[in-house]
Image (cartoon, rainbow, N blue to C red):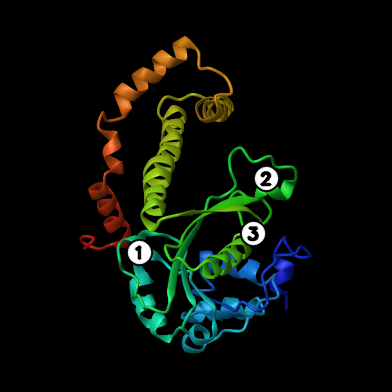
Amino acid sequence: MTSSKELNPLYGKTVELDPAISVAVVGAAGKMGTRVSNNLNLTDAPVHYVEASESGRQRLAELGREVTGIEEAAAAADVVILAIPDTALGTVSAQVVPLMKAGSVLLTLDPAAAYAGLLTEREDVHQACAHPAHPSVFLERTTKEEWADTFGGIAAPQEVVAAYEGEDEAIRERTAAVIRAIYAPVIDVHWVTVKQLAQLEPTLVETTGCMIGQFLKDSMDHAIDEVGIPEDAVKALFYGHIFISLTNALRGSNPFSDACLRAMDYGRESIIKPDWTKVWDDAELDKVLARMLEIDTIER
């Protein structure tokens, strides 16, 4: 049997986490569950892997990871990570939170359900959320492994934005230690409110950034498939200009030419709606989160 450590490029490296902190990963065989479990498996901390599906249990067995029942894991862990889809967080938290020990932390990986008030709360259980920033486009990569790790959590350093609105600094430190382990290697953890994290993800990142990223692909495909420009020429010119556009706009590396600025103005007039900043309104945030969570509306 191939061990999980042999499957992970970080094998042989150290991912630090105090062995006194026990962690449970609910959904340990899913996409994010596997990612965070791979890193936790590189620590000396006790980890409880929870997985409901039979196929997921089989994948964990193939990785040499023992499955723990949700009741046992929730009762034993200092930090319970819900690595499951946003749409299931309300239901699963209702099952898990009553089982958790006093003073433990419920950690989610996306702010939508927390901001929408869908998570089950308990006075003696803390709640936190941590979302990976992913390796920056400006990260100074020096190895093939770092270049290959576009998502983060394997070789390329990344930052993390997290929310914890309690006042217990020991709980914040414990949560930060787990965050640094599951997303390792981590440069820094930035603390914001739950609402601010929801404004960053989805409004800034997905509604704006990811949408524009896909739009770039759509425009490139149109140039190739509909206009008929050779694909190699399109990619050669476009990929380089995407990078210089980001460095110019976000870092001020070089000024855009006067002609380019005029073309950019035309692009704004032709493509971007004049009222685009409305996506930052609270009502619009509620709309997009309700859509993501597949619910009719967010009640407050």
* Proximity of marks 3 and 1: CB atoms separated by less than 8 Å: no
> Where does the image place residue 175, in percent across and percent down from the top left?
54, 67
Residue found 43% across the figure and 43% down from its top: 210
Query: Badge 3 is on which residue?
Result: 184
Pick the residue in front: 39 or 223. Answer: 39
Q: Quarter of the image containing the C terminus? A: bottom left
Q: Secondary structure at mark 3?
A: loop
Residue 48 image-quadrant placement: bottom right
* Proximity of marks 2 and 1: CB atoms separated by less than 8 Å: no
Seen as rendered, the residue at the extreme top is 258
Q: Report the amino acid beneath label 3.
A: Ala
Q: Report the amino acid beneath label 1.
A: Ala
Q: Secondary structure at mark 1?
A: helix
Pick the residue in front: 243 or 202. Answer: 202
Spatial separation of the CA atoms under disc 3 and disc 2? 16 Å
Query: Badge 2 is on which residue?
Result: 147
